[in-house]
Image (cartoon, rainbow, N blue to C red):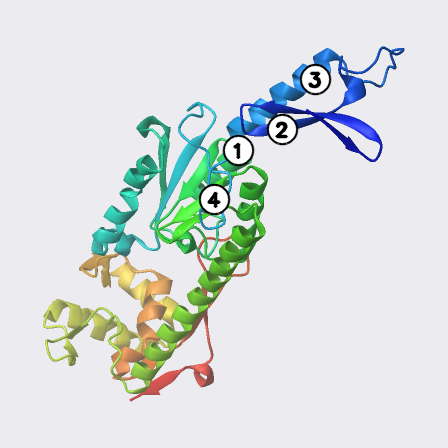
Amino acid sequence: MRSSSHGSSQVLVGYRETLVLRIPLTATTLAPSQPLVPTKLTREAVEELVLLAGECEMLCPLIPPLSGGSCLQTSNMPSSTTFRRSSIRQSTPHQQISNQESLRLQYALQDRAQSLGWHTEDVEIIDADLGLTGASAQHRTGFQELVGRVTLGQVGIILSVDVTRLSRNCSDWYPLLDVCGYRCCLIADNDGIYDPGTPNGRLLLGLKGQLSELELHTIRARMTAGLLNKAKRGELALMLPVGLVRDALERVHKDPNQEIQDRLDLIFTTFLRLRSASKVLGFLNAHELGIPRRDRFGDVIWKKPTGAAILQILKNPAYAGAFVYGRTRSTRRDPNALHSKQVRLPMDEWKCAYQ
C-alpha cells in the first residue's frame, strides 16, 4: 500500500496485524532503478527494523489498559527476564504477632498474581522488611532489593495490598516511580493496576505517596496528643522502676520483696551519708552487694552495681512519689542512624510533673 506525504512516497507495511511500518519508497525495491546512495536503508536495515518492532510488541502487547496501566507484561515472557514482585511489610515486630490477618492477606497476593497471568515460578515474594517502618528506606533491604531488580528490568509488576505500604517517604517513593516508568514496570494494589510511565498513573501514585507520608505524621501527632492528655491527668501508666509495683486498680505500691526494699533503702541512706554517687558505688563493691534491676522482659534480676545504675536510681522521681512525663527528648544527629538518642531535658522543660 502506497501513500504520499509532502511530496515523498512511502510504503505502509502491515506486520502481525498489530503494527504498521512506514518505510520510504526509495528505500525499497518498488522504487524505479536509480544510483545507490549510502544513506538509503539497506535490506538488512529493514529486516532489523522489523525485528525490533517484534521485540517491542513482546514487551508492550496491545491490551486494554487498567487504571492508567498500559504495558502489562504477561506470563509469556521468559521467567528469567520478567518477574512479578510481592512486597510484604509490617511496621513493627508487634504487628507481626498481633496482626496476623494482615500478614495472611499480603501473602495471598501470590494468588492474585496468578489470576493476572503470571506463572507460579515467575512470582517472587519479598518479605525482608517485616517489622520495619516505612518512614525511611535507609535500613530496608527488601525495598532496596526491589528498586535494584526494577532498575535491572527484571520486574514486570509490583503487587501490594496497598501501594502506601511500599514507602511512607516521598524521597524514596518518587525514585521508585521514575525507575518503574522507565522500565515499564506496573504497580498494583487492591484498588487497581497503575502504570507509572503514564501521566494519569504517575499522578495517582504520586498522590497516594504524598497522602501516605502525611498520614504517618498525622497518626504520630494524634497519638502524641492523646498521650500528653492522659499524662496531664496523671493516668498514664508508665513502666515503674524496680522496687515499685502496680496493682489491679492501677495503684502504685512498694514491692513486697523485702530484700529489694532493703537494698534501695541502703543506697539512699548511704548517699545521704556520703554525698557522692561514686562513693555509694565504692561502698557496694567493697561489701560485694548487688543491686536489683529489670531485664528486657520486666523481670527483676540482681546485677553488679555501676555508676550509671546508681545515678538512675537516685535521680528517678518515682521513688519520691512524683509522677513525671517528658524528661527526655528523642534526637537523631546522624541521619543514617537506625535509632534516635534520648537527651535529658532540664526540669523546667518537663511536660508533666505531679507530686
In the image, is 7 to the left or to the right of 263? right
Q: CA distance from mark 4 to mark 3?
A: 30 Å
Q: Considering only order in the chain, which callout, 2 or 1, is on the residue closer to the N terminus? A: 2
**Label 1 packing within 10 angstroms: few (<14), some (14-19), many (20+):** some
Q: CA distance from mark 3 to mark 1?
A: 21 Å
Decide: marks 1, 4 in contact (CB < 8 A)? no
In the image, is 263 to the left or to the right of 67? left
Question: Which numbered tag is attached to residue 46?
Answer: 3
Q: CA distance from mark 1 to mark 4?
A: 11 Å
Label 3 element class: helix
Three-letter code for the amino acid on which mark 2 is drawn: Val
Instruction: Work out which residue is located at the far bottom of the displayed protein and give it.
Output: 355
**Label 4 packing within 10 angstroms: few (<14), some (14-19), many (20+):** few
| Position of the C terminus by quadrant | bottom left
Name the image quarter holding residue 133: bottom left
**Label 3 packing within 10 angstroms: few (<14), some (14-19), many (20+):** some
Question: Which numbered tag is attached to residue 65?
Answer: 4
